């Protein structure tokens, strides 16, 4: 049986590439039943491949100028036409269940990407999709091996940490407000926030909100991996005060560094707590409060130094083979749907 020829929507990884993509790239390159193709526009539009695999398709629409963005929109439209007119099977990993907040034309194209998808890969077992949409579950892999090369800092008692993109939906402002309330209850707490703000306005707002707060450290730029490891390992608790959370690489990054997380209560996080250990996934209801932050820090302090969450279901060793099975399932499903369509028309 010849390998399945699969083009990914990502290019060769760079130092700033999401480690999930970098590790997936390596796993697919090592999988003998897959011919792994990294993305390029020409091959995507006119080249030969069996499967096209989308990750974060909105990234393909971005440009540093309006005309570059317009060109990207036209190229993505050409890819969609190519897929519609050919036998290429389209797979998409459901990194986010909601469409991003983008302009109308971009949203129109993203809806077309979704409608063109033959098979979906979901990263947790609680992702809800319409029953008619074929899917395969491949759990989001951990980052233990990825972070093993970096030195860790000593844990600082009473320190809450946040890392990742600073965006409004991630509610870093809610974390700052909860920290302000928590300092009124315990004056030995500290807070460290690291990550690139999505806008200058958001950065200005965050600096203003924390200007009079003691114990706050801000590093408002992209964090290199060694800086992320240092920030997370210094934290007694990693706090992600998102208003909505589904798949979070930051949660897996913190757990991979043996740090508990405080996250919103939902089905995804409740399932994760059962999987890795309740003491590692602490939750809050509605919006984070200072009282809950203080309580969670006390719970985190009770975890013995050297303890580790159970991430045994999230090894990367089977990721390549699991994706290969998903691709073959998608190909078989597309063939059976076409056969059923021909029989129905006869």
Image (cartoon, rainbow, N blue to C red):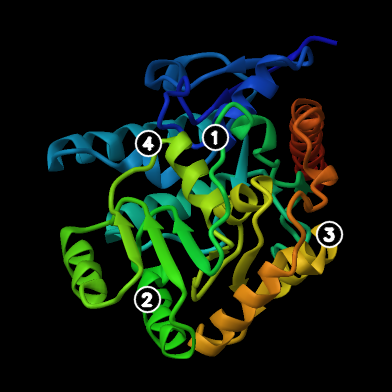
Residue 142 sits above or below residue 192 on the image: above
The part of the image, by quadrant, that contains residue 121 is top right
Circles 2 and 4, Cβ within 8 Å, touching? The answer is no
From the viewer's perspective, is the residue at label 4 or at label 3 nearer? 3
Between disc 1 and disc 4, whose residue precedes? 1
Residue neighbourhood size for the residue with mark 1, other residues' Cα within 10 Å, grouped as few (<14), some (14–19), many (≥20): many
Residue named by callout 2: 176
Residue at disc 2, secondary structure:
helix
From the viewer's perspective, is the residue at label 1 or at label 4 nearer? 1
Disc 1/disc 4 C-alpha distance (Å): 25 Å
From the viewer's perspective, is the residue at label 2 or at label 4 nearer? 2
Residue neighbourhood size for the residue with mark 3, other residues' Cα within 10 Å, grouped as few (<14), some (14–19), many (≥20): some
Between disc 2 and disc 4, whose residue precedes? 4
Residue named by callout 3: 275
Label ID, residue 121: none
Residue 26 sits above or below residue 269 on the image: above
The part of the image, by quadrant, that contains residue 166 is bottom left
Residue named by callout 4: 76
Residue at disc 3, secondary structure:
helix
Residue at disc 4, secondary structure:
helix
Between disc 2 and disc 3, whose residue precedes? 2
Residue furthest front as drawn:
188
Residue named by callout 1: 19
């Amino acid at each position: 049986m010849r390998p399945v020829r699969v083009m990914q929507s990502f290019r060769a990884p760079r130092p700033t590439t999401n480690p999930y993509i970098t590790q997936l790239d390596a796993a697919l390159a090592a999988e003998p039943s897959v011919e792994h193709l990294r993305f390029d526009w020409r091959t995507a539009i006119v080249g030969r491949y069996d499967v096209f695999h989308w990750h974060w398709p909105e990234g393909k629409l971005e440009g540093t100028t309006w005309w570059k963005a317009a060109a990207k929109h036209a190229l993505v439209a050409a890819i969609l036409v190519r897929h519609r007119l050919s036998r290429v099977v389209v797979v998409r990993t459901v990194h986010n269940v909601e469409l991003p907040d983008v302009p109308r034309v971009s949203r129109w194209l993203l809806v077309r990407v979704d409608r063109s998808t033959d098979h979906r890969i979901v990263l947790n077992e609680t992702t809800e999709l319409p029953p008619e949409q074929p899917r395969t579950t491949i759990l989001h892999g951990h980052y233990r091996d990825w972070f093993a090369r970096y030195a860790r800092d000593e844990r600082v008692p009473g320190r809450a940490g946040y890392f990742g993109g600073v965006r409004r939906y991630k509610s870093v402002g809610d974390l700052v407000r909860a920290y302000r309330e928590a300092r009124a209850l315990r004056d030995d707490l500290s807070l460290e926030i690291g990550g690139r703000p999505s806008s200058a306005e958001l950065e200005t707002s965050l600096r203003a909100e924390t200007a009079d707060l003691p114990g706050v450290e801000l590093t408002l730029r992209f964090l290199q991996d060694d800086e992320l490891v240092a920030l997370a390992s210094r934290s007694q608790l990693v706090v992600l005060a998102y208003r909505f959370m589904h798949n979070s690489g930051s949660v897996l990054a913190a757990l991979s560094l043996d740090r508990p997380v405080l996250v919103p209560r939902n089905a995804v996080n409740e399932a994760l707590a059962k999987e890795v250990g309740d003491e590692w996934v602490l939750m809050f209801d509605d919006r984070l409060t200072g009282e809950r932050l203080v309580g969670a820090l006390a719970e985190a302090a009770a975890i013995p130094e050297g303890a580790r969450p159970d991430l045994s279901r999230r090894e990367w060793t089977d990721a390549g083979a699991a994706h290969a099975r998903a691709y073959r399932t998608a190909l078989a499903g597309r063939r059976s749907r076409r056969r059923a369509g021909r029989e129905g028309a006869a």
